Amino acid sequence: MAKKNNSAAVSCMKEDDLIVITGAGGFIAGALARYFRKQGFTRIRAIDKKPLPQWYQQIEGVECLCMDLSNEGNCRRACQDAVEVYNLAADMGGMGFIERYRIECLRSILINTHMIESAYRAGARRYFFSSSACAYNIELQKDKNSRALKESDAYPAMAERGYGWEKLMSEMFCQEYYAERGLETHIARFHNVYGPYGTWAGGREKAPAAICRKVIEAKNENSDEIVIWGDGNQTRSFMYIDDCVKGIDMIMHCDKLIATPVNLGSDRLVSINDLVSIVVGIGGITLKRKYDLNAPKGVAGRNSDNTFIQKVLGWQPNTPLEEGLKNTYEWIEQQYKDRKAGKQTVN
Ligand code: NAD
C-alpha cells in the first residue's frame, strides 16, 4: 500500500508498529482505523464489544477483535505488543442517552482504568484518551451566549453528571500515569463530532444525525413537521469526522501536548435552530417546527475556545458545517433507503 506522507504518525512511527484502537466498531474509532490504514500502517488492532456484524465499518487489513474492555484480562490481551493505544471505547450517545443512563456512562471508567494500566505494562510508547467537552464546568454553560470554553475551565470541577465526571476522572488517570510512571499520554476533549458512519437512529444519535434523519423521514413520509428537542435556541459547535481523526493524530504526536488536555472541536457556534435550517435547506423542503420542551436538551450553550490548539498545532478543525452536513445527510439518506429496502445498515 502506498504510504501518504501527510500524517504526524507517519513521521513518528514505523509502518509495522502495532496500533491498538478501542471502540473501533463505533463511529470515531472506526474512522481512525481507516485513516491509519490509509496512511500505510500494516498492524492495526481494532477492538469493540459489539459482535463483528454490528461494527459500523470493517477495514480490510485490520485485525478486528470482539472483546469487552471493562474486563482487565481482555485489556491485557488488547494491549499486547502495542506501540500506540487509542482508547475511544465508551458507553455513550447523544443527550437522550447520557442524561438517562448515567450509570452506564460512569462504568466506562473501568475501560480506561484497565486500558491505561495494560498499555503501561505492555510498554506502549503513547496512550490516547478521548475525553469530552462534557468534562467542563456546567456553571459556565448556562447561557446560549456563554463564552467559549478554554482548557482551564474544567476546574473548579462541576462536570456533566455521569458522563462528564467519568471523562474528567479518566483524564486524571492519564495525567498521573505520566507524572508517576512516565507513560506518555495525550488527551483530547472532543466537541460534538458528526459525519458519515455515525449513529443515526436508535436513541444514541446526536443532534446533527438526528436532524438529518428527521428531515429525510419527513420528506419520504410526506410530513410537513419536524420535532425539535428544547426550544431550539441552545447552542453548540460541531466538528466534522475528518477533522476529528486528523486532530487525534496531530495531538497524539505532539510533544507539547503530553498529559495536557486540549480542545478538539469547531469554534463556530450555532443554535439547534440554525442547524435545522441548514439541514432543511439541504433536503430542499419546508417544515413546520414543533418544539418538545420536555425532551433532554443539555446545557444552554457550549463552544470550543481554540486558542490553545491553534497556538500549539497551528491548526484547528476547519471543514465548513454546510459541507460536512451535506455529506452526512447524503450518507444517512442512503442508509434510510437501504433500511427500507431490507438491506443491512449501520443502525
Ligand atoms: P460510538 O458509540 O460510536 O463508539 C464507541 C464504541 O465503544 C461503541 O462501538 C461501543 O460498542 C464501544 N464500547 C462500549 N463499551 C465497550 C466495552 N466495554 N468494551 C469494548 N468496546 C466498548 O461513539 P463515538 O461517537 O465514536 O465516540 C468515541 C469516543 O469519543 C467515546 O469515548 C466518546 O465518549 C468520545 N466522544 C465522542 C463525541 C461525539 O460527538 N461523538 C464527543 C465527545 C467525546
Image (cartoon, rainbow, N blue to C red):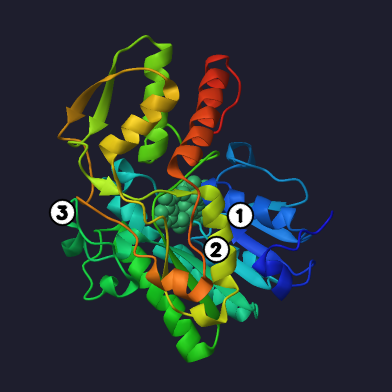
Q: Residue furthest bottom?
A: 180
* Residue to which mark 3 is pinned: 143
Quarter of the image containing the N terminus?
Answer: bottom right
Residue 213 visible, this angle: no
Disc 1 marks which amino acid? Answer: Leu
**Taking 103 as reference, is 277 above or below it?**
above
Q: Residues within 10 Å of mark 3 (few under 14, many from 20)?
A: some
Q: Are marks 2 and 1 in contact (CB under 8 Å)?
A: yes
In the image, 193: left or right of 28? left
Nearer to the camera, 308 or 92: 308
| Ligand 1 is within 8 Å of the C-beta of the residue at disc 3 | no
In the image, 126: left or right of 61? left
- The x, y position of residue 310, in whole percent, is 46, 69
* Residue to which mark 1 is pinned: 32
Q: Tell me the residue at 46%/89% (across/down).
A: 179
Q: Residues within 10 Å of mark 2 (few under 14, many from 20)?
A: many
Disc 3 marks which amino acid? Answer: Asp
- The x, y position of residue 294, in whole percent, is 15, 35
Q: Are marks 3 and 1 in contact (CB under 8 Å)?
A: no
Q: Secondary structure at mark 3?
A: loop
| Ligand 1 is within 8 Å of the C-beta of the residue at disc 2 | no
* Residue to which mark 2 is pinned: 248
Tell which tag, 3 or 1, sits nearer the viewer. Answer: 3
First-in-chain label (3 vs 1) = 1
In the image, 142: left or right of 30? left
Q: CA distance from mark 2 to mark 3?
A: 29 Å
- The x, y position of residue 338, in whole percent, is 57, 20
Q: CA distance from mark 3 to mark 1?
A: 34 Å
In the image, 129: left or right of 271? right
